Image (cartoon, rainbow, N blue to C red):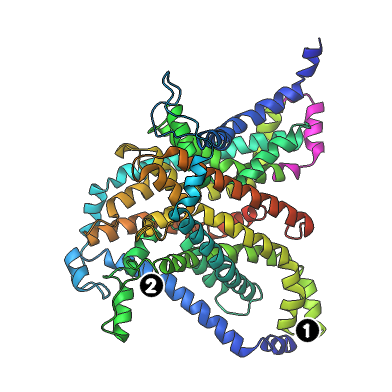
């Protein structure tokens, strides 16, 4: 133990101070702006202009109810929840289905079809946004819930199918084969064997997808024009955009937008980092 | 008879399992890609695509030549490259350093630091963009901080076209270093700890462990991450949209934003926007080929 300590000491002490300094700077640069944001949300616009950095002298809670009503946060939250939950469930279910097909039923088409999904991991949706916009218009789904959900599901499938295929491949073939011999249909095998076993990969996928869709801005911004279909990022930008000078309300709306995902992160920290690293191996 | 044999239960099941995902995915990725290839050769500027009076004419490579003659295309491409450079020379080394010291437990509070460094990348790009725009604005803390040193300091960060990309790059560094930290940490955990312990017992210093064991083991991941940085830069849209909107004078535009502005900023120029889309898809496909080649070469050491 003592030798171990001595050896750790040979990690240059200057270097160690340097590392601590960089970490400290990074920590400060993360916590301070977020803290400043929340603190400013308790100031009136007038106070913010007089005192942009200091502690609120006359703290007020009024920004929150006003911002909540004017930015229509109930609608924004409802829509964000709807798109996030529905697309996540669809991505998980469709990925498990296709993953099961790719992993356990032999077909000459698999390399080509599975490969087309793998390409999608690096082929970003941003690079086709205008053609996608024109396509959604063409099929008459502009400004509809379906017109947002389909791209969200399609966007989540490459990673989903990559992870699910890998996972289901690790289930021994004999499990499926013996169920087949017992006369079980593929549907039954899928629902009563594969789905229950796939819980870990489903959790990883759910977390990746929730974080991705909850924060997604580009697609909803482009594919939706009515207030009733807007999600949090789009609504917040519209409300607190650069032309707005109601600082107090801006800060409150940004805080409202930030809090849920930060809480989600603090709760599922371990799973999120696991999901990110699982996803990053290939993509 | 032959047909009956062909549609075995296996084949039917395969089709039913794979088809739903395939249809949705191809509708979202493949259909628009084909779409963009065709429309990029036209002067389509809006209107119903399949009507009796065709709303466009084929103009060959006209959109592409117009694109490469447009200075904003090159400004956007250059900014995409700046973003790649800040990733390769900023996020990746920092992320690697953080991952290394956290994994080897060379600092205390490793859990806390990991949580903090990754925190920004979980927040919506819109909130991050607005937050930093306010932070760097004339009313923000940054101005006040600088004026403590030099009361005459004028905040031109977001106004001066020459330097406006610097705050953008800073925010990108701030936001995504955590992602690389997580990637490197996960791959460090795959290195057999016994290997490192044995080296330490043989008298290797921490520095030698880093150079002789860890860096070689992670070389594949470092190369792949650098290429991923390019794909990440093609992805950047929301953050810039909220932080600068591509301004001042469109000097902080990136390819995705350039495509969006081409389609929506003035009168629609969908043909040209589709040409930009084709360029971005081709860039992505080149990246995919490079990644695959590298993964084969490094023998999947990151798996």
User: Which quadrant is the N terminus of chain A positioned in?
Assistant: bottom right
B281 displayed left or right of A47: right
Q: Position of residue B294 (x, y in %)?
A: 73, 57
Regarding mark 1 in the picture, which secondary structure is present there? loop
Give coordinates of residue A170: x percent, y percent.
75, 45
Residue position marked by numbered label 1 in the rendering:
B204
In x, y percent, where is residue A270? 57, 60
Residue B13 shown left or right of residue A150 in the figure: right
Question: Would you identify the image quadrant in which residue A191 lies?
Answer: top right
Distance CA(mark 1)–CA(mark 2): 40 Å
**Residue A199 visible, this angle:** no
The residue identified by callout 2 is: A32
> In the image, which disc is placed on residue A128?
none
Which residues lie in the magenta part? A167-185
A183 within the magenta span: yes
Figure quadrant of residue B48:
top left
């Amino acid at each position: 133990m003592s030798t171990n300590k001595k050896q750790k000491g040979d990690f240059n002490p200057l270097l160690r101070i340097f590392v601590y300094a960089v970490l400290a700077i990074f920590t400060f640069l993360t916590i301070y702006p977020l803290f400043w944001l929340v603190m400013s949300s308790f100031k009136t616009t007038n106070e913010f202009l007089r005192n942009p950095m200091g502690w609120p002298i006359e703290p007020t809670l009024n920004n929150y109810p006003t911002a909540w009503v004017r930015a229509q946060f109930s609608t924004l939250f409802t829509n964000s929840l709807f798109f996030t939950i529905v697309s996540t469930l669809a991505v998980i279910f469709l990925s498990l289905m296709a993953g099961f097909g790719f992993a356990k039923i032999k077909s000459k088409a698999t390399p080509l079809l599975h490969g087309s999904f793998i390409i999608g991991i690096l082929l970003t949706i941003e690079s086709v946004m205008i053609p996608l916009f024109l396509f959604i218009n063409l099929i008459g789904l502009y400004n509809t819930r379906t017109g947002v959900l389909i791209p969200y599901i399609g966007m989540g499938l490459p990673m989903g199918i990559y992870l699910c295929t890998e996972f289901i491949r690790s289930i021994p073939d004999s499990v499926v084969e013996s169920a087949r011999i017992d006369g079980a249909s593929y549907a039954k095998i899928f629902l009563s064997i594969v789905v229950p076993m796939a819980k870990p990969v489903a959790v990883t996928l759910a977390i990746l997808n929730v974080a991705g869709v909850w924060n997604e801005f580009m697609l909803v911004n482009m594919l939706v024009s009515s207030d009733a279909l807007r999600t949090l990022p789009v609504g917040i930008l519209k409300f607190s955009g650069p032309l707005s000078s109601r600082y107090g309300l801006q800060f409150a709306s940004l805080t409202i937008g930030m809090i849920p995902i930060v809480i989600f992160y603090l709760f599922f920290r371990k799973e999120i980092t696991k999901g990110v690293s699982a996803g990053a191996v290939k993509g | 008879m032959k047909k009956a044999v062909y549609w075995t239960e296996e084949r039917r099941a395969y089709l039913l399992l794979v088809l739903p995902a395939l249809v949705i995915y191809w509708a979202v990725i493949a259909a628009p890609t084909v779409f963009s290839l065709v429309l990029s050769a036209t002067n389509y500027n809006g209107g119903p695509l399949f009507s009796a009076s065709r709303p466009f004419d084929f103009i060959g490579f006209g959109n592409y030549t117009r694109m490469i003659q447009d200075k904003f295309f090159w400004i956007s491409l250059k900014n995409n490259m700046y973003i790649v450079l800040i990733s390769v020379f900023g996020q990746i080394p920092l992320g690697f350093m953080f991952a290394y010291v956290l994994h080897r437990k060379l600092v205390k509070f490793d859990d806390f630091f990991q949580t903090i460094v990754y925190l920004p990348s979980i927040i919506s790009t819109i909130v991050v963009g607005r937050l930093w725009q306010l932070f760097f604005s004339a009313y923000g803390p940054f101005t006040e901080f600088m004026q403590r040193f030099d009361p005459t300091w004028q905040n031109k960060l977001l106004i001066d076209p020459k330097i406006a990309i610097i705050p953008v790059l800073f925010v990108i560094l701030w936001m995504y270093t955590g992602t690389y930290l997580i990637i490197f940490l996960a791959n460090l955990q795959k290195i057999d700890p016994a290997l490192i312990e044995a080296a330490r017992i043989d008298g290797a210093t921490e520095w030698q462990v880093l150079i002789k064991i860890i860096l070689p083991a992670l070389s594949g991941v470092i190369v792949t991450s650098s290429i991923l940085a390019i794909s990440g830069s093609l992805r950047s849209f929301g953050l810039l949209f909220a932080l600068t909107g591509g301004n001042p004078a469109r000097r902080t535009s990136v390819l995705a934003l350039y495509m969006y502005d081409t389609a929506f900023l003035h009168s629609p120029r969908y043909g040209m926007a589709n040409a930009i889309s084709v360029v971005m898809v081709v860039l992505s496909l080149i990246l995919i080929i490079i990644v695959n080649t590298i993964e084969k070469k490094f023998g999947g050491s990151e798996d």
